[in-house]
Amino acid sequence: RLIIAIRSLKDKYIVWPRENYRKEVHKGFEKFEFPIVIEAIDGSHIPLMEAPSKINKDIYMSRKHRYGIHLQAIVDHKGHFTCYEIGWPASVHDAKVFKHSYIYKNNNLFIENEDYLLADSAYPLLPWIITPFKDPLGPNAQQQKYYNTIHSKTRVVVEQAFGRLKARFPFLKYMRLKDTIKGTNIIDIALILHNFVEKNNDE
């Protein structure tokens, strides 16, 4: 019953910016010199203490040689989670998770005119995704490096959000279970509760 009750809060606390709040998010990112940014996106691994109870358990092994579940999340200027994908094995690259995500397949439902998501170089450059220059070269190298610096300072909001999430729920630093479906459900609950606490603290 408790899980059902918490999940009933998802539509209230995991919300994509619309109308007036969308304008507030744009203004929030202006302080980083990115006034047309609506969100920042990144991936994070939720490590597992033991190998998953699956036949193909090795696909859950990350490049750091740890078992884990992939969490892709999008946050606003305050670091509130607004959209996420949970459950992919840790070995799967951020770009692949993104290209199979709901927001990628249905970006027209989320991205309005002059809306952009900030992403690191692991993500593809798209009309609505802003990534850094991979190798600043040529006569514009200095401008590109400056852009990359501002991009990094702005996008750090999503990394900080992951940090606060794991600090609030330390079990996300190493989950003691083998059932990845159960693990995915626990992560989902943690994200909802995290936003519940953060948004109520803001108020």
Image: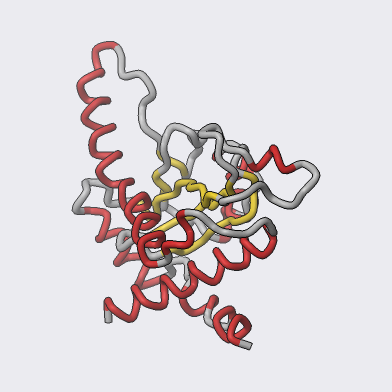
Residue at image point 39% right, 45% down? 118
Give percent across and percent down for residue 87: 64, 54
Q: 101 or 109, which is in the foreground?
A: 101
Tell me, yes or no, if residue 114 can be seen here.
no
Instruction: Locate residue 58 relative to residue 168 in the image: left or right.
Output: right
Q: 119 or 48, which is in the foreground?
A: 48
Give percent across and percent down for residue 44: 48, 48
Residue at image point 46% right, 42% down? 129
Residue at image point 41% right, 48% down? 116
Q: 49 or 84, which is in the foreground?
A: 49
158 above or below 185? Answer: above
Instruction: Locate residue 112 relative to residue 153 in the image: left or right.
Output: right
80 above or below 12? Answer: above
Residue at image point 36% right, 61% down? 167
Q: What colour scheme governs how the chains and residues are painted in the rendered image of this protein?
A: secondary structure
63 above or below 174? Answer: above
Instruction: Locate residue 166 relative to residue 67 in the image: left or right.
Output: left
Looking at the rendering, which quadrant does residue 120 occupy? top left
**Quadrant housing the C terminus:** bottom left
**Quadrant housing the N terminus:** bottom right
